[in-house]
Image (tube, rainbow, N blue to C red):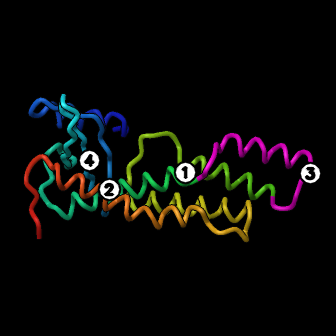
Amino acid sequence: MPLADDLERIAAAAGHRDGTVVTGVLATEPAGGHRVYVCAFESQAGERSWLALDAHGEPVRSERDVREAVSIAALCEVAEESSFPGDLDELRARLVALRITEAPEGIDEAEDAARDLQHVLGAPPHVASPERLDEIGRAVRRLELALDPTAPSPFTEAMRSAVEVADALWADVAAAYRGSLDYP
């Protein structure tokens, strides 16, 4: 089943609960193909709440499973947003123009790396997973090195702060989780 259809299925399973509506569904695979969907709800008053569902549309009660799903979703989001500070289409066009006018050494590698990163990022939706995070990281680093092998990595700096983003999202989810969580 295509991911978009799967997300619609889970959104329908989450449904309207206690006067709230589903405002988002994030697909995650934090560990070995174990799919967890993190669903955001909003009340008419604008209050947000959360619920994680398994592949069968049943609520996830394990604190560890929910926390891992929320964490990988946040890390992948930061990685996607930090992968390149501009427009990859524009970069690719500038690289082509540079190849045509000046043909500097390494331009083919830079063009390939930009194309590969664009391919890795793709069009949403995506399943947030450790494998996706690694794939983005490898593609970004390859592009950074192709563009300037001596420059520090802005992506690495962004990912250092990603743990704080993941912790903040987890705090929000834990505080407004729709149901009880089983803590180990």
Sequence-first disc among 1 and 2: 2
Residue at mark 1 = 120
Q: Can you give x and y, in whole percent of width and height, for residue 175 in the image? A: 17, 53
Q: Secondary structure at mark 4?
A: strand
Main SS of the magenta part reads: helix
Residue contact between numbered discs 2 and 4, judged by CB atoms under 8 Å: no
List the single residue furthest toward the right. Answer: 102
Tell me if mark 4 has few (under 14), some (14-19) or many (20+) residues whose alpha carbon lies within 10 angstroms of its own: many
Q: Can you give x and y, in whole percent of width and height, for residue 152 in the image? A: 65, 69
The front one of 29 and 40 is: 40
Tell me if mark 2 has few (under 14), some (14-19) or many (20+) residues whose alpha carbon lies within 10 angstroms of its own: many
Q: Secondary structure at mark 2?
A: strand
Q: Amino acid at mark 3?
A: Glu
Sequence-first disc among 2 and 3: 2
Q: Which residues are magenta?
A: 84-106
Q: Amino acid at mark 1?
A: Val
Q: CA distance from mark 2 to mark 3?
A: 45 Å
Q: CA distance from mark 1 to mark 2?
A: 17 Å
* Residue 102, disc: 3
Q: Can you give x and y, in whole percent of width and height, for residue 138 in the image? A: 57, 63
Could you tell me which residue is drawn at 22 percent across and 47 percent down? 55
Q: Nearer the viewer, mark 2 or mark 3?
A: 3
